[in-house]
Image (cartoon, rainbow, N blue to C red):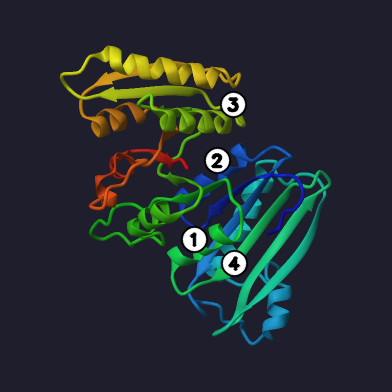
Amino acid sequence: MEVSGDKRFRILSCIDGSDESYRGLHYAARLGGGVDADIILLYVRAVDQDMRSGGLQPRVFRENLLDWGLDLPGIKYLKKGREDLAELGIMSDHWTERAVHVDRQGDPLGDNSIEYTNRAGKKIVLKLIVAPDIVEGILEECESNEYDLLILGASERWRPGRRKSFWDPAVAEKVVARAPCSVIVARELKENYGHLICTNGSEHAIDVARKDAILASRCQCPISLISVVPEGESEATAMEALTRTREAIEAEDVVVEEILPRVGDTVEEIVKAGARYSVIVIAPSEIRPKWWLLETDIAYQVMEHAHNSVMIVR
């Protein structure tokens, strides 16, 4: 781990050069703007993918990874991420710099990172790692280090005549299913529109709502709650779930702006209401029977059909 000592809030922001990944990074900067938060930018490349060193010795190339100005995807995307953070004021004071290298068998350049630390101990880390598979690379990084939140951009649906983006839709789905921490899948991520937290009033849902409310309060993001009951049930059931959840959140000194009781199809109602918010927040099912499939879980259906960003909370 790059960080030791007191527990810190750690955000892993996956960068692939897409607009969505940089929108996700900007949101990471807002959530992780405090001195107790670290932001790690990650680019995962295939073994020896586009890492020709132009005749430079690998050691010299690594030592000057961000200074050569070589037009290599991982390097230029991470450099842009660093520049964006500087423009946002995240890296405005004095930072020390440390380079870290880890050999990877079968790849001449291995894993490389640049770690920046300011006087308060806050860290910004640029990581360029190699893996046989993008999903495995992201998950290995998550499992090797303790992250509180992972943010990755959702790719657009495949359309004729459009180049497929770096993150295949299946990548986000696989990462969400296996990640040990909460995940935001960024899609048209806009700031200042708040979090819409889904709840059914269960202890599990209330714990998830409380956890996200505390996170959202880090950046003064407005919080709203939604509860959906099926057709034929009383709206009062939804109101009861919302009231219990609201009380639990406000016990943490976090204000709930509005509550939305709804009757109808759960996924449809959440997706429709969620379009007005920056992020829809939902937890995967707590109980998974033997026949459970990813596609049957309400949380993953919301992630699939939402028009905006979705956060799967763990």
**Image height check: is 244 above or below 207?**
above
- What secondary structure is found at the residue carrying circle 2? helix
Q: Marks 1 and 4, how far apart in space?
A: 14 Å
Residue 60's tag is none
Q: In the image, 229: left or right of 40?
A: left
**Alpha carbon distance from label 3 to label 2:** 12 Å
What's the amino acid at mark 4?
Leu
Residue at image location 64% in from the left, 60% down from the top: 126
Residue indicated by mark 4: 128
Residue located beneath label 2 in the image: 27
Asked if 189 appears above or below 49 in the picture, the reply is above
Horizontal and vertical percent position of residue 46: 48, 74
**Disc nearer the start of the sequence (2/1):** 2
Mark 2–mark 4 distance (CA, rounded to whole Å): 21 Å
Which quadrant does the N terminus fall into? bottom right
Rendered view: 95 above or below 109: above
Residue of label 1: 139
